[in-house]
Image (cartoon, rainbow, N blue to C red):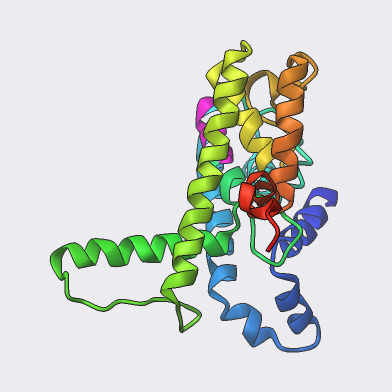
């Protein structure tokens, strides 16, 4: 019962707070028709189904209700960067799913970490349009979210954000790998700190901790946590020369 209650309210916390407020004041239509909320719900349900399948393959002792509850709780707590884990998922299949959930996180306008699902929506739609333009190069296909066209400038900023996000992830993974961590531990720890999740992968996963990481690695992960929490560009702009020049 406690896990179900926590799952429901954790899921709600992953939705844009403005939409939650609108729903509380009686405007459910705005929440139900919001495209990002639909993607968020679909991702949670899809990931839960995959984890249920994986658990049935690796652990057939539990009942369906127990498997469903554990899977849903784990998926929701990971995607919302709450990380109240009730089990250690060391199987590579689960790790892959959770790393993908950690990368994008939940909705914009919530307190959750990650690159945010609204950027995933724009990225997916822009990719679809680009594939269509390969066959029809003269086609004019604006990216639409919630029925409104997104300007090319905003799409470019979102693509730049995701690119820099990946670059920080790769840079952090390389530094930690050079300090002796395995690729799984380096990548999982960097992504966890960048998305402000908590547990990483391997020895830094739910059953482990970050204590064994060298001091330089801890400093690196601390900086990466700040970068992820303050929306990337806000921190990275401090390291540019033109920020410090007199206007």
- Seen from the viewer's position, the closer of residues 165 and 85 is 165
- Seen from the viewer's position, the closer of residues 186 and 66 is 186
- Left or right of 73 in this view: 58: left
> Is residue 94 a member of the stretch shown in magenta?
yes
> Is residue 104 a member of the stretch shown in magenta?
no
- The image quadrant of residue 102 is top right
Task: Tell me residue 130's x, y (percent).
Answer: 28, 63
What type of secondary structure mainly makes up the magenta span? helix
Vertical comparison of 61 with 106: above or below: above
Task: Tell me residue 69's x, y (percent).
Answer: 69, 47
- Seen from the viewer's position, the closer of residues 62 and 227 is 227
Quarter holding the C terminus?
A: bottom right
User: Is residue 94 at all visible to an observer of this figure?
Assistant: no
- Left or right of 221 in this view: 156: left
User: Is residue 85 at all visible to an observer of this figure?
Assistant: yes
The magenta region covers 91-99
As drawn, the residue found furthest toward the left would be 135
Q: How many marks?
A: 0
Q: Residue at x 57, y 38 (%)?
A: 168
Q: Residue at x 60, y 57 (%)?
A: 116
Task: Tell me residue 146's x, y (percent).
Answer: 50, 80
- Left or right of 102 in this view: 113: right
Q: Residue at x 70, y 67 (%)?
A: 109
As drawn, the residue found furthest toward the front would be 246
As drawn, the residue found furthest toward the right would be 2
As drawn, the residue found furthest toward the top would be 180
Task: Tell me residue 107's x, y (percent).
Answer: 64, 63
């Amino acid at each position: 019962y406690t896990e179900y209650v926590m799952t429901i309210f954790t899921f709600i916390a992953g939705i844009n707070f403005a939409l939650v407020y609108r729903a509380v004041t009686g405007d459910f239509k705005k929440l139900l028709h919001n495209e990002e909320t639909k993607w968020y719900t679909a991702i949670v349900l899809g990931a839960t189904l995959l984890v249920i399948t994986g658990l049935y393959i690796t652990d057939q002792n539990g009942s369906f209700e127990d498997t469903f509850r554990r899977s849903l709780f784990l998926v929701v707590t990971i995607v919302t960067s709450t990380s109240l884990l009730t089990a250690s998922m060391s199987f590579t299949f689960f790790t892959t799913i959770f790393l993908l959930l950690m990368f994008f996180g939940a909705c914009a306008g919530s307190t959750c970490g990650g690159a945010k699902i609204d950027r995933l929506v724009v990225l997916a739609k822009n990719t679809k349009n680009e594939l269509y333009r390969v066959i029809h190069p003269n086609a004019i296909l604006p990216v639409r979210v919630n029925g409104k066209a997104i300007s090319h400038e905003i799409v470019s900023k979102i693509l730049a954000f995701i690119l820099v996000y990946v670059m920080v992830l790769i840079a952090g993974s390389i530094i930690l790998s050079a300090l002796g961590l395995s690729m799984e531990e380096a990548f999982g720890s960097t992504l966890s700190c960048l998305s402000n999740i908590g547990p990483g992968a391997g020895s830094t996963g739910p059953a482990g901790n970050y204590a064994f990481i060298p001091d330089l690695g801890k400093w690196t992960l601390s900086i990466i946590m700040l970068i992820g929490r303050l929306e990337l560009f806000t921190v990275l702009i401090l390291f540019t020369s033109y920020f410090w020049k007199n206007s």
